[in-house]
Image (cartoon, rainbow, N blue to C red):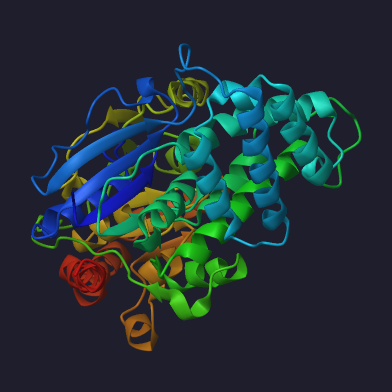
Amino acid sequence: MGDVCMILEGTYPYVTGGVSAWVHDLITNLNDISFDIVTIVPSIHYAKELKYKMPPNIVSLKCLPMNEFDEKNRPRLNIFTRKKFFKELFEAFEGFETEDYSALGRVIAAFNKYSPAIGDILNTHDGWRVFEFIYKKFGTGAPFIDFFWTLRFIIIPLFNLIKTKPPDSKCIHTISTGYAGLLAAIFKIQLNRSMLLTEHGIYTNERLLEIIDARWIYDQNSDAVEVLKELPPLKKFWINLFVAIGKLTYHYSEEIITLYRGNQLLQVKLGADPKRCKVIPSGIDTAKFNMRRESASGGPEYKVGFVGRVVPIKDVKTLLYAARFVVDKLPGAKFLIKGPYDEDLVYYEECRTLTSILGLQENVFFLGPGTVHDFYKELDVVVLSSVSEAQPLAVLEGNVCCVPAVSTEVGCVVELLYGIDEEDVKLGPSGIVVPIKSPVELGEAIIKILSDRELNMKMGETGLKRVMTYYKKDDLKTKYHDIYSNYIK
C-alpha cells in the first residue's frame, strides 16, 4: 500500500513529455512518500516500454487498457438477477440528469452487488434498453444507429474503469479530469479516501479542441456543401460527456490545483468550487539546467530549437511554415526539433513530407528524443508553436539557460515571458508571444530575436533572473509535500 495513489491518463511512465517529466520529478523529490501508480492507456500495445526508471518510492504500477476486455468464459447474470441490476442502474441514472453526483456511488454499488459481465450490457435486451434510455435523454438528434455504435465505444472504457480494484492507498491524486478523474472519483467512493486533482492543461478544453477536429466521430453531414452553424450531434454528445466528467471530478476533489491563474478561472467556469482551487506553478531544477549559454551567435548561422513531442497539439506544421519564412530572410537558420515522434507516426511522416515540400531538408532536423540539459546552451532561440499548453517547461528551461523564447499565446506563456506580477514585469520580456496558428507572426518574431544580438542577450539574461526568482523546483516540492502530509496521516 502506498501513501498516494496517483492516477494518470496516457502519460507517465509510458510516454515522455511535460506532464510525465513533472510527475517523475515530483515523485523522485518526495522520496519519503510512497506512491501507487495507475496509468490509463487506450490498449495494452500502447504501454510497450517504460520511458522512465521507476523511483524506489513507487510501490506498485498498474496499466489499465480502457478499450479492451476479455470475458469470453465469464458467465452472464441469470435473467432475474440481470433485471434487478438494471433496475438499480436506471434509478442511479436518473440522478445524473440533475447533477446529483451521489448517483455515481449508486452505480458502483450496483456493479459491486451484481458483478455483471460486459456481455450483460452489450448483448442483452436489458442492455439494449440502456442504449434506448440514454439516446432519448442525450441523443441530440443523431441517427440512432450512429449513436448506438458511439455509445458502445464509450461504455467499454467506463465498464473497465468501474470494475477496476483500487490499491489501498491513503490518498488519491489524479493528474487530470477525464477518464483519470472519473477513476479517481470511483476509488474515492470505494475506499472512502480524500481526493486531489492537479490539472496542467484543462482536460475538458483540450478534448473540445480534439473533438471539433476529429475525423473518427462520424458526421453524416460531413460532405454537405452548407457549412454547419453548430457542431454535429455526436460531437456535441462527446463534448457534453467530458464536461460532465469534469464537473464530477471537481465535485469529488478536496483540492483542485493548477499551474496558473488563467487555468483556475477556466476550472471555475467549468464547474469547480473556487474555495477549493489553488495555483502551484511548476518549477525548474536550476542545478540541472546550469549550462548557461555564453552568447548569441549573431549570425550568419543561427540555431532555433523546438523541444517537445511531434504531435498535432504541438502544431509542428505551423513551425515548419514559419521556418520557411525565416530561411527566406536568414538562409543560415537551422531548426532543431528535439523530442519523441513515435506517439503519432502518421503526423510525424506528414511533418517530414511537409519539410521536403517546403524545401527545408538542409534547414530542419528531427533529432528524436534525448536529454535536453546541454541542448539549450547551443541555441539562439527556443520556439513553441503549440495550440494548447499549460505551463510549458521548454520556455522555462530555455530561459534558465539564458536563451530567449518565441511562443504562441497558450497557457501561462504571457506570464512566463512578460511577467507574473508588477515586480516581475519590471524585469522586462524574456521572449515574444504570438497568436496560435500564425506562421508569419511566428517567423517575424524569430527573425527579430535572431537579427538583434543585443536584444537576444538581454532577453536571455532576463529569463534567467525570472526563473531564479519565481520558478524554482524546491518551491513545488515543499508545497506538495505539505498537501500530501495533510491527507496521509
Q: Residue at point 37% right, 33% down?
A: 64
- How far across and how far down the image is residue 141, in percent? 87, 39
Q: Which of the 4 quarters of the picture holds residue 270?
A: bottom right
Q: Which of the 4 quarters of the picture holds residue 151?
A: top right
Image quarter in which the C terminus is found: bottom left
In the rendered image, is residue 338 in sight? yes
Looking at the image, residue 7 lies above or below residue 317: below
Q: Residue at point 49% right, 71% down?
A: 264
* Viewer-proximal residue among 69 and 410: 69
- How far across and how far down the image is residue 108, in percent? 51, 46
- How far across and how far down the image is residue 241, in percent? 64, 47
Farthest residue to the right: give it.
226
Farthest residue to the top: give it.
73
- How far across and how far down the image is residue 190, in percent? 40, 52
* Viewer-proximal residue among 89 and 399: 89
Q: Is residue 69 left or right of residue 166?
A: right
Q: Residue at point 26% right, 50% down?
A: 168
Farthest residue to the bottom: give it.
422
In the rendered image, is residue 318 in sight? no
